[in-house]
Image (cartoon, rainbow, N blue to C red):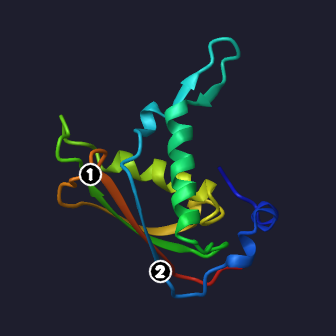
Amino acid sequence: MRLTEKQADRMGVASKIIPFGHSQEFSFTWPPSQNNLYANNPRTGGRFMVKRGKDYYQEVSRKLQEANFKSYGAARLKVEIMCHEPAAAERIRDIQNADKTVLDAMGAAGLYFDDSQIDDIRIRRGPVSELKKGEIVVMIEPITEGE
């Protein structure tokens, strides 16, 4: 979902643009697979986000609000993602499948206008998490000033 500058202003995000060179770090539960985020509507032929996806987007938005996040506006971004699988995982998870969902959810919450602003991204598998659902830690910083 692309957030326009006008929408960001209405949400009160535009007034909280982060200064150039400052990073932020956030922690979220492991996201649902991008492959299972949407379902087809057989009646209309369209696609819609399933409840599990909507719940995850709301969780990300809530955690960002609790952290009093600052928006990056239109800045070009560098992102580092550390994926911690749950200890009780029945299978090894595909870490590349986790990034798109969490990045889209952060964009929808107003952290940046669109994930196309990300020019530098690194995804790593970290130590196993003791949390039941696992954990994704995201560090994000601007590499150019926002407009």
Which residue is located at x 62 percent, y 84 percent? 145
**Residue at left offset 54%, top offset 52%:** 105
Front residue (pair 117, 139)? 139
| Pick the front one: 147 or 91 | 91
Q: Where is residue 18 in the image (x, y as percent from the top left)?
A: 61, 81
Q: Where is residue 39 in the image (x, y as percent from the top left)?
A: 54, 24
* Residue drawn at the location 52% of the way across and 81% of the way down: 143
Residue lying at the far front in this picture: please name it. 66
Q: How far apart are marks 2 and 1 (CA)?
A: 25 Å
Q: What residue type is labelled 2?
A: Ser
The amino acid pointed to by label 1 is Leu
Q: Can you identify the residue that label 1 sits on?
A: 131
112 vs 77, nearest the viewer: 112
Side of 144 relative to 92 (left or right): right
Looking at the image, residue 59 lies above or below residue 77: above
User: On the image, numbered disc 2 is attached to which residue?
Assistant: 23
Quadrant where the image shows the C terminus? bottom right
Q: Which residue is drawn at 17% across and 60% down?
A: 127
Q: Where is residue 130 in the image (x, y as percent from the top left)?
A: 21, 53
